[in-house]
Image (cartoon, rainbow, N blue to C red):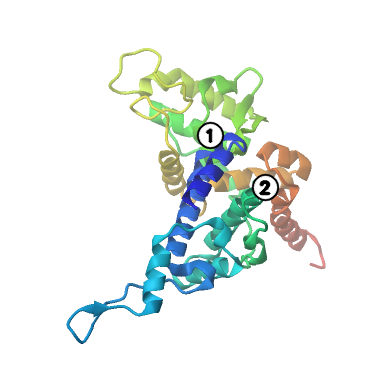
Amino acid sequence: MLEQIEAFLLYLQAERAASPHTLKNYTIDLQQFRAFLRAGGIHGSEPVVSRVERPAGNGSTERTADEVEQRDALRRAIDATEIDVLAIRAFVVDLHRRGIGRSSIARKLATLRSFFRYLCREGIVGANPAKLVPTPKLPKRLPAHLTVDEVDRLLASPIEQNPPGARDLAILELFYASGIRLSELTGLNVRDVDMREGLVRVTGKGNKERIVPVGSKATAALRRYLDQRIDLVQGTKRGAPESAALFLNRLGGRLSQRSTARIVLKYLNQSGVGPKITPHGLRHSYATHLLQAGADLRSIQELLGHARLSTTQRYTHVNLDHLMEVYDKAHPRA
């Protein structure tokens, strides 16, 4: 099964242009499933726990025939053709017992469905056993977002007089002006920004490129940051930093996703908004405010880079809450 997993991951990387983040998650999920099977979870049986050998009458140790058979089964390689729906159900039950959240279980099931769908396409297995296992019902949660006033307070927090402040404001302005993902923002290079036209070329999921407009305030913040970008780099000779990345750390390298998330959290706390959202919440705020201002769903879908309109439609629930609030305040019979 290990070779089949490696072939699947190579297929995702080479033919589906999966992102490193996606490949990492698929690898973790499949390795976890393989470890479960090697522990005895194949064909729906319980994972085998280690057994203490019992001393026989002559002082030696012995095992029952069943124990010997299970031990030998663990030693041999597991093949994907041996895996049935009972094994996958047992895996899901084991995840529940260990307290794994429903969203994580749903992701792992989606990974297994993709894996067996690939094996079906390659003719290795005849059917996809993961299709028969239902996904745990997930609670419907509205995306957390900021109000317009909260966004204004957040964007007023960074002090531009120093290079880190100019960078941080440019990050916050670009997040809210474009609605791009955290990974998309940290993956930007200087050449991806067209200051004159106010456009940013974004590489999204599956290495798909899209052009996103940004407002004049974000463009101005980016221009001020670029003027101080070299000064941000410490311990290097004055001149062009080695990295082509748009947002740099103090060593001149690309700013990481973790560091960017810390920057956003810092200013959320500093502005008094509090840690009510993550960087992804700025993306939600962008989409929600566009919808409240009258933008249509198809346009928002294109701007966000959603593959399916159904993903964008969740913002209609947020907009409905806004409409109800307006109705309650304005209608005399509300």
Task: Give me the residue at 55% from left, 19% from top.
Answer: 191
Q: Position of residue 101 (x, y in %)?
A: 51, 65
- Furthest residue in direction front, as rendered: 58
For residue 116, side relative to residue 35 (left or right): right
Q: In this view, does 237 lie to the left or right of 7?
A: left
Crowding at dot 2, Cα within 10 Å, few <14 / some 14-19 / many 20+, comes out as: few
Residue nearer the viewer, 133 or 151: 133
Residue 168, given in percent of the width and then of the height, sits at 45, 34
Left or right side of 52 for 83: right
Q: What element carries label 1?
A: helix
Taking depth in this image into account, of 333 and 35 the one nearest to the observer is: 35
Q: Where is residue 129 in the image (x, y as percent from the top left)?
A: 63, 62
What type is the residue that disc 1 sits on?
A: Leu
At horizontal 72% and vertical 37% (from top left) the residue drawn is 302
Asked if the residues shown at circle 1 and circle 2 are in contact, with their CB atoms under 8 angstroms apart, the answer is: no
- The amino acid at mark 2 is Arg
Secondary structure under tag 2 reads helix
Asked if residue 278 shows in the view, the reply is: no
Residue tagged 2? 121
- Whether 275 is drawn above or below 65: the answer is above
**Callout 1: few (<14), some (14-19), or many (20+) C-alpha neighbours within 10 Å?**
many
Residue situated furthest bottom in the rendering: 57
Task: Look at 39% across and 18% down and name the residue there.
Answer: 241
Q: Earlier in the sequence, mark 1 or mark 2?
A: 2
Number of the label disc, if any, that sits on residue 185: 1
Tell me where residue 140 sits by quadrant.
bottom right
**Near-viewer residue (140 or 207):** 207
Point out the frontmost of discs 1 and 2.
2
